[in-house]
Image (cartoon, helix red, strand yellow):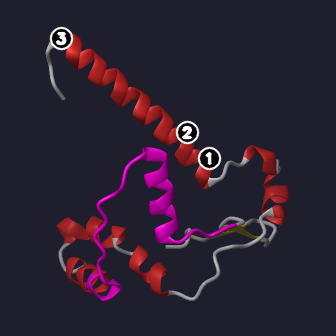
Amino acid sequence: MPQLELHIWTPSGKILTFAGPRALTTQEVITLCQRLAGQDANVTTVPVSVLRFTRQLTRFFEWINDVADRLAFSEVLTSDTVFSVPMTETYNLLGVDSKDIITLEKYLQDYFTNILKKLKDLKAQSKQSDIFI
Protein backbone atom coordinates (compact mmCIF):
# COMPACT_ATOMS: atom_id res chain seq x y z
CA MET A 1 0.00 0.00 0.00
CA PRO A 2 1.52 3.34 -0.95
CA GLN A 3 1.79 6.22 1.43
CA LEU A 4 -1.14 8.63 1.31
CA GLU A 5 -0.59 11.74 -0.73
CA LEU A 6 -2.02 15.01 0.54
CA HIS A 7 -2.26 18.30 -1.32
CA ILE A 8 -2.73 21.63 0.46
CA TRP A 9 -3.32 24.88 -1.36
CA THR A 10 -1.51 27.87 0.12
CA PRO A 11 -2.76 31.48 0.08
CA SER A 12 -0.12 32.23 -2.57
CA GLY A 13 -1.74 29.67 -4.88
CA LYS A 14 1.03 27.08 -4.53
CA ILE A 15 0.10 23.44 -4.05
CA LEU A 16 2.03 21.64 -1.34
CA THR A 17 2.34 17.91 -1.80
CA PHE A 18 2.83 15.68 1.21
CA ALA A 19 3.82 12.25 -0.04
CA GLY A 20 7.41 11.30 0.52
CA PRO A 21 10.55 10.44 -1.35
CA ARG A 22 9.78 6.70 -1.28
CA ALA A 23 6.46 4.88 -1.29
CA LEU A 24 6.43 1.54 0.47
CA THR A 25 4.26 -1.40 -0.50
CA THR A 26 2.12 -3.16 2.07
CA GLN A 27 4.48 -6.12 2.01
CA GLU A 28 7.50 -3.87 2.63
CA VAL A 29 5.83 -2.34 5.70
CA ILE A 30 4.85 -5.79 7.03
CA THR A 31 8.39 -7.12 6.48
CA LEU A 32 9.87 -4.06 8.21
CA CYS A 33 7.54 -4.48 11.21
CA GLN A 34 8.35 -8.19 11.43
CA ARG A 35 12.07 -7.48 11.39
CA LEU A 36 11.79 -4.78 14.05
CA ALA A 37 9.50 -6.88 16.27
CA GLY A 38 11.65 -9.96 15.85
CA GLN A 39 8.72 -12.19 14.96
CA ASP A 40 6.44 -13.09 12.09
CA ALA A 41 3.08 -11.37 11.70
CA ASN A 42 -0.16 -13.24 11.17
CA VAL A 43 -1.33 -11.55 7.97
CA THR A 44 -4.75 -12.05 6.43
CA THR A 45 -5.21 -10.82 2.89
CA VAL A 46 -8.59 -9.38 1.97
CA PRO A 47 -9.49 -8.72 -1.67
CA VAL A 48 -9.88 -5.02 -2.47
CA SER A 49 -13.36 -5.73 -3.87
CA VAL A 50 -14.46 -6.96 -0.42
CA LEU A 51 -13.10 -3.77 1.16
CA ARG A 52 -14.95 -1.63 -1.38
CA PHE A 53 -18.20 -3.53 -0.86
CA THR A 54 -17.87 -3.24 2.93
CA ARG A 55 -17.22 0.49 2.61
CA GLN A 56 -20.30 0.98 0.43
CA LEU A 57 -22.42 -1.07 2.84
CA THR A 58 -21.27 0.81 5.93
CA ARG A 59 -22.01 4.20 4.34
CA PHE A 60 -25.74 3.45 4.63
CA PHE A 61 -25.66 3.52 8.42
CA GLU A 62 -24.79 6.76 10.16
CA TRP A 63 -23.65 5.04 13.36
CA ILE A 64 -20.85 3.23 11.51
CA ASN A 65 -19.74 6.01 9.17
CA ASP A 66 -16.37 5.95 10.89
CA VAL A 67 -15.87 2.43 9.56
CA ALA A 68 -16.61 3.61 6.05
CA ASP A 69 -14.13 6.46 6.44
CA ARG A 70 -11.41 4.07 7.58
CA LEU A 71 -12.05 1.80 4.63
CA ALA A 72 -11.39 4.67 2.22
CA PHE A 73 -7.80 3.43 1.88
CA SER A 74 -9.18 0.76 -0.44
CA GLU A 75 -9.48 3.50 -3.07
CA VAL A 76 -5.79 4.26 -2.64
CA LEU A 77 -4.92 0.60 -3.18
CA THR A 78 -6.46 0.59 -6.64
CA SER A 79 -5.40 4.04 -7.83
CA ASP A 80 -2.59 4.62 -10.31
CA THR A 81 -1.34 7.67 -8.41
CA VAL A 82 2.41 7.95 -7.96
CA PHE A 83 3.12 8.51 -4.30
CA SER A 84 6.86 9.10 -4.50
CA VAL A 85 7.54 12.74 -5.21
CA PRO A 86 10.42 15.08 -4.45
CA MET A 87 9.63 17.08 -1.32
CA THR A 88 12.29 19.81 -1.69
CA GLU A 89 9.86 22.53 -2.79
CA THR A 90 7.38 21.67 -0.02
CA TYR A 91 10.14 21.72 2.60
CA ASN A 92 11.37 25.08 1.30
CA LEU A 93 7.88 26.64 1.34
CA LEU A 94 7.30 25.41 4.90
CA GLY A 95 10.77 26.37 6.07
CA VAL A 96 11.56 22.79 7.10
CA ASP A 97 15.01 21.25 6.89
CA SER A 98 14.89 17.84 5.22
CA LYS A 99 17.27 16.58 7.94
CA ASP A 100 14.45 17.13 10.47
CA ILE A 101 12.15 14.70 8.64
CA ILE A 102 12.44 11.07 9.67
CA THR A 103 11.73 8.11 7.45
CA LEU A 104 9.02 5.56 8.13
CA GLU A 105 11.79 3.05 8.81
CA LYS A 106 13.30 5.26 11.53
CA TYR A 107 9.87 6.06 13.01
CA LEU A 108 8.94 2.38 13.24
CA GLN A 109 12.35 1.51 14.66
CA ASP A 110 11.87 4.07 17.46
CA TYR A 111 8.30 2.89 18.01
CA PHE A 112 9.21 -0.79 18.28
CA THR A 113 12.21 -0.03 20.50
CA ASN A 114 9.98 1.90 22.93
CA ILE A 115 7.07 -0.55 22.84
CA LEU A 116 9.27 -3.63 23.29
CA LYS A 117 11.09 -1.95 26.18
CA LYS A 118 7.78 -1.10 27.88
CA LEU A 119 6.49 -4.65 27.36
CA LYS A 120 9.66 -6.08 28.89
CA ASP A 121 9.28 -3.69 31.85
CA LEU A 122 5.65 -4.73 32.31
CA LYS A 123 6.60 -8.39 32.18
CA ALA A 124 9.31 -7.84 34.79
CA GLN A 125 6.88 -5.94 37.03
CA SER A 126 4.21 -8.60 36.67
CA LYS A 127 6.64 -11.29 37.86
CA GLN A 128 7.55 -9.21 40.88
CA SER A 129 3.94 -8.75 41.98
CA ASP A 130 2.55 -12.08 40.73
CA ILE A 131 0.25 -10.26 38.27
CA PHE A 132 0.36 -11.71 34.78
CA ILE A 133 -0.53 -9.63 31.77
Q: Residues within 10 Å of mark 2 (few under 14, many from 20)?
A: few
Query: Circle 3 sits in a helix, a strand or a loop, which is it?
Result: helix
From the image, tell me which residue sits under label 1. 106
Q: Amino acid at mark 1?
A: Lys
Point out residue 133 in the picture as x, y percentages from the top left corner. Answer: 18, 29
From the image, tell me which residue sits under label 3. 129
Q: Is residue 126 visible?
A: yes
Q: Residue at point 50% right, 62% down?
A: 29
Does the segment drawn in magenta span residue 32?
yes
Position above or below: 52 against 87: below
* Image quadrant in which you'd find residue 50: bottom left
Q: Is residue 96 visible?
A: no
Q: Residue at point 15% right, 19% down?
A: 131
Point out residue 63 in the picture as x, y percentages from the top left corner. Answer: 18, 66
For the residues marked 1 and 2, what is the alpha-carbon distance in whole angstroms?
6 Å
Mark positioned earlier in the residue sequence (2 or 3):
2
In the displayed structure, does residue 118 sit left or right of residue 91?
Answer: left
Does the segment drawn in magenta span residue 24?
yes
The answer to whether marks 1 and 2 mark residues whose Cβ atoms lie closer than 8 Å is: yes
From the image, tell me which residue sits under label 2. 110
**Which segment did they paint magenta?**
22-50
Query: Circle 2 sits in a helix, a strand or a loop, which is it?
Result: helix
